[in-house]
Amino acid sequence: MSRSVTLRGNKQGVHVARLLTFICALFCVPGLWANEAHELYNDLYTVGSGSVLLSYQYIDVRHFQNGADKVPIPEVTAQSLYLEADYAVAYRWRLELGLPYIWKRALPPSPHQPLALDPPRPEVPYIDDGKYRGEFQDFYLGVTYLWIETPVQVEPFFRIIIPSHDYQFFANSAVGQNLWKVEMGLELTHFPLFSNWYYQLSCSYTVVEQTLGVNVNHFRFNAETGYFLTPNFALKVFGISRVGNGQNAQLYPPAARTTENWFEHDRTLKHNSANVGIGAEWFFHEKYQLAANVFTTVWGNSVHWVDFAGDLAVTRYF
């Protein structure tokens, strides 16, 4: 082996060693990057500051969880654009406003047959024909208060969900339930000192407008943990769960799918589920953040099983 080749090999070895040392330092040496994110988050409560978020989501459903049985169904897909803005109106107070636009389709055959109901409902169109249809869903109005800042950030919140218009709810391809909802909850966020990790937990209770006297009030639980690989880039894992009241899907065998209860079933079922996913967040500019997530359902009861879902969001801070 010539001396020049040996020298080149030694230089490459030095570069590789430096790279490995840098990577180890990212994961092994405690840093302040999560704390920098903490400071940025608290800046959202500075009066006059806020953010605007635009997100795109895709959901693919091919099963329905009917009790203990995961039943194949014709494919249901949904795409949505969601616009949300929040603004710090006073010290420790933020107002939030959002509205989604949803395109959805369900492949036939479908049990949502308006003309098969007793009595038939010709005024309700059959829309589970495999065609995409889009419309606005529900207004989202909320207020969040920064109750405790350290050592754990505690934020109570209150939200109202209002249907944007009288949209159709009887279909697999319906964009929503067309119901008023009020949600009250608490979110905890912890940025450990001298660490690049962060942790977030939230719990809320939602009171839902009743249909046919059925109580479908429910709890929501969210958990998230993330690690900052750099001051501007973080990876995370998360879980989202809904547990509450409502009817079981087993109450509606094919022979019962002509009644008023069947017509309203999408608004009276439990829709209990647990989803898990992974994601990443990147501050590619001082005032812009890009986030991406993928998730799937791991448990459910009387609910569409999300086989795959992904979303991409950009946030502008001001």
Image (cartoon, rainbow, N blue to C red):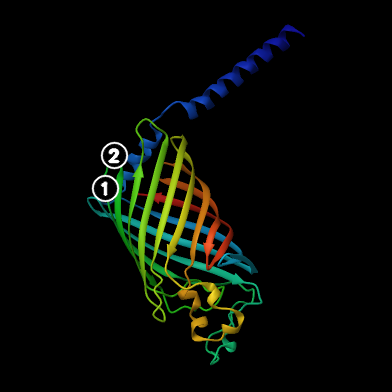
Q: Amino acid at mark 1?
A: Thr
**What residue lies at 33% left-to-right and 58% top-to-bottom?**
185
**What residue lies at 48% left-to-right and 53% top-to-bottom?**
313
Quickly name the residue at label 1.
Answer: 46
Q: Nearer the viewer, residue 307 or 89?
A: 307
Residue 306 vertical position relative to residue 27 in the rendered view, above or below: below
- Disc 1 crowd, CA 10 A, few/some/many (<14, 14-19, 20+): some
The residue sitting at the left extreme is 91
Q: Is residue 225 left or right of residue 206?
A: right
Determine whether the residue tagged by mark 1 lies in a helix, strand or loop. Answer: loop
Q: Is residue 206 left or right of residue 12?
A: left
Q: Is residue 205 left or right of residue 60?
A: left
The nearer-to-camera label among 1 and 2 is 2
Quickly name the residue at label 2.
Answer: 151
Residue 152 vertical position relative to residue 124 in the rendered view, above or below: above
Q: Earlier in the sequence, mark 1 or mark 2?
A: 1
Give x and y (percent) for residue 240.
46, 55
**What residue lies at 29% left-to-right and 48% top-to-bottom?**
154
Residue 73 vertical position relative to residue 259 in the rendered view, above or below: above
Give x and y (percent) for residue 86.
34, 56
Determine whether the residue tagged by mark 2 lies in a helix, strand or loop. Answer: loop
Q: Which quadrant of the figure has residue 156? A: bottom left
User: Is residue 5 visible to the viewer in this orientation of the structure?
Assistant: yes
Q: Nearer the viewer, residue 162 or 193?
A: 193
The residue sitting at the front extreme is 68
Alpha carbons under labels 1 and 2: distance apart: 19 Å
